[in-house]
Image (spheres, coloured by chain):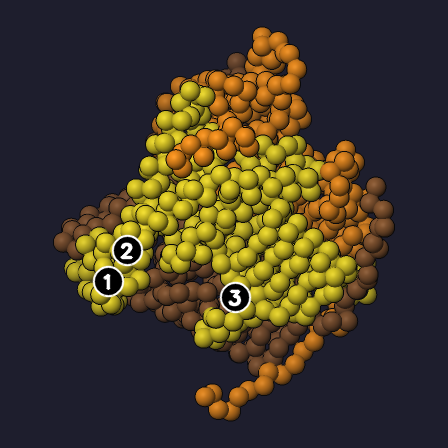
Chain colours: A yellow, B brown, C orange
């Protein structure tokens, strides 16, 4: 009887993904592809099994063909699902899928060199980082930027669902939430990173460094504002310390400025400026020490 | 010799969970059940394999019977473990377990309609959300609310350990920490969400929106204060921006008020009020630009 | 053709970990060892299968020998990889590996008693914690301290890469980022914990309590400052509320002081002192209520 009521709820409320109707990728299917993409970018860094030198060409070929097969399938689902209300030509969508996925694979060498710059930037800004290998292996800021650069590529090719799924998977892994639509320059550094949020229309220059808990966000707005710039612009060389919240599409942080921690900013800051919480906001009291602890 | 010392430590210090003595669920056993519950609520959204329309009734039946078998077993462990110091009747505990687990399964259609309202609320407050499907698939705020609504049901039925294990599993996945005891109204929205903490005696109305890093917490108090209200009350329609900390059982945020980011609040705020960090707390300085970078 | 360009990028840019050249542990290999170490410390708490009383001695012996075999192998990789530019004696490195790993296994009973103190401290400071078992099973603060105490042991024995990998794995699980180099006293409590960052040269006394989002961090400095103390000192009995940022190697928070939430601190605070954001930093406005919602 329970089961009957549940099946009825599937009929009336929906929210059931069925392979033989218009359907979309499950979260886990995108996760599997992401694992292969990370291993293609940095062989031997993440998975338990490390290859020999001799095996790398074959394994790379297998990885590439696995990614193409699986990602074409999932991209197809997304594009067909998006057009589900209107007639569409299966062959032309299929062709489009192959084009996009091949383009991503061709981007791999460029992605690797961009990511090397990010890793160098993270390593050189962190006295606790012993070397770049450690950054690629272990640092969550690097993981989040890695997945962002893949997801941003797919976002630019107007794939629905998959870019956001990728960014939310790495958000779950790292606590760093970079919307795939954000525009981020070279040599980007996120240190520690838990709680960082970078919204869809954020624009970030080169050599920017963010600490944990920094929000580059939007004001709570009605949904029809989705086509205007809602998130800030951060110019080259800016550093923003832990826990600062910077909101608004017209807010610009000028080049080489430094924003201290725990700051709430909804207006622009000129270049070469430091902004901190001043001391006079503090209330300092002596604790009442109980003589008798009973 | 090492092993002997370790076994001795098991004897003297305890902290060993043994299947043939009074024992309790392991973390992984609850995780497995949660995966099945999520798939029962939203078939095809999370696991890699998506069913056909024809298979859904059988698969649903299998899922329900798996969940009943496994959850009854784990709930039994918890209830017997809780009573380990006193004699108890195995049959009556067993009967109680079945009642609670059946009640949870019967709640599934209602949970689905509550969660649909939450998803609509998240989607309509977020210009970056393309549709409700994306919210259910990918958004951590939705995942956390989903698990909270299950855990809260079990908490209300006075099951020990399992509700907290569930909430900590999704806390690990999303960075959002909602105590299963909190009372939360309809159409609840958490955006981004990393770092959100909602304490055990928090009361939240309808149509409330929280951003990442918001704490609805308690003052550090002695443990014997566990039966009084220690966490705030948030009335209908309130929005709280990133990183604000609101503490105390008598703190009430009035309906439709807006709390800006990075605010520290330990007193009540009237309805229809905006509270922000003012500008005069800031120290703004020009950076000293070194002419010679050597 | 794609594959060829990718293989060329492996040659020119590097970042490929090959089993038959100088190589290092993958992230997943360290994760597997950590799972066994946690199960050795608290049998039956984390993995799905719980042992019988009778099986525990054999299972413990198997766990110990698995950990020794696997960890010696990974420690060897790290030490050889670190010396890759200079000639080294394989046998002497191998001997060193066994010594360190045996020392870790011998530390297990002491680690268990230290961790019991941490769990008691977490439980007694939290009215929502029903008992110590729940803390060990479910609390992320406890998980992070558990892994920190293992990683700190290996860090003190100058193992490269592995301690940081361990701390980043649990950072991913819990949102709590404790550098393995930090020095932390007894009965340490982290409540909720998402977003906590504790830097490499931090020194923390006994009975300290941190809430979520607390940063004990460093100023952004050039990399050559890596040998000086860059992170704060927190004396015995201090409590720090959610989201406070405390930076700098000369910053000392005196014993038994209380730091409120959302505070930005870059100077020292005397003992027995309370520091809060004062009220006069706030801007409070009535919301403009639209009479007509069109």
Q: Real-space Cα distance between discs 3 and 2?
A: 39 Å
Q: Which mark is residue A93?
A: 2
Q: Quadrant of residue B121?
A: bottom left
Quick one: label 2, few (<14), some, or many (20+) residues within 10 Å?
some
For mark 1, does the 10 Å Cα neighbourhood hold few (<14), some (14 to 19), or many (20 or more) residues?
few
Q: Please, what secondary structure does the residue beneath circle 2 have?
A: helix
Residue B165 in the image, given as x and y percentages of width and height? 43, 47
Name the mark on residue A88.
1
Residue B210 is labelled as 3
The image quadrant that residue C232 belongs to is top right
Mark nearest the camera among 3 and 1 is 1
Q: Say whether residue B292 is visible.
A: yes
Q: Residue at x 60, y 13 (%)?
A: C93
Looking at the image, which residue is at 45% across and 56% down? A156
Instruction: Indicate the chain on which mark 2 is placed.
Output: A
Image location of residue B73, percent across then percent down: 29, 43
Q: CA distance from mark 3 to mark 1?
A: 40 Å
């Amino acid at each position: 009887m329970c089961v009957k009521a549940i099946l009825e709820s599937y009929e009336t409320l929906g929210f059931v993904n069925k392979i033989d109707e218009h359907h979309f990728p499950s979260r886990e299917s995108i996760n599997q592809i992401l694992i292969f993409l990370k291993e293609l970018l940095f062989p031997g860094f993440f998975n338990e099994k490390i290859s020999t030198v001799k095996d790398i060409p074959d394994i790379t070929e297998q990885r590439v063909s696995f990614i193409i097969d699986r990602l074409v399938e999932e991209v197809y689902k997304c594009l067909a699902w998006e057009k589900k209300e209107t007639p569409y030509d299966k062959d032309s969508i299929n062709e489009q899928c192959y084009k996009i996925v091949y383009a991503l694979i061709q981007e791999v060498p460029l992605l690797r060199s961009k990511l090397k710059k990010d890793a160098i930037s993270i390593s050189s800004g962190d006295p606790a980082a012993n070397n770049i290998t450690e950054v690629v292996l272990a640092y969550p800021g690097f993981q989040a930027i890695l997945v962002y650069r893949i997801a941003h590529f797919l976002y630019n090719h107007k794939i629905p669902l998959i870019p956001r799924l990728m960014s939310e998977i790495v958000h779950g892994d790292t606590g760093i939430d970079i919307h795939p639509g954000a525009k981020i320059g070279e040599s980007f550094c996120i240190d520690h990173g838990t709680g960082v949020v970078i919204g869809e229309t954020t624009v970030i220059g080169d050599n920017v460094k963010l600490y944990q808990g920094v929000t580059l966000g939007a004001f709570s707005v009605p949904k029809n504002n989705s086509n205007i710039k809602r998130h800030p612009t951060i110019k080259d060389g800016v550093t923003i310390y832990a826990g600062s919240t910077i909101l608004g599409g017209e807010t610009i942080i000028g080049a080489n400025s430094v924003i201290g921690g725990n700051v709430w900013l909804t207006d622009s800051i000129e270049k070469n400026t430091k902004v901190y919480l001043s001391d006079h906001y503090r209330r300092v009291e002596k604790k009442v020490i109980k003589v008798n602890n009973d």
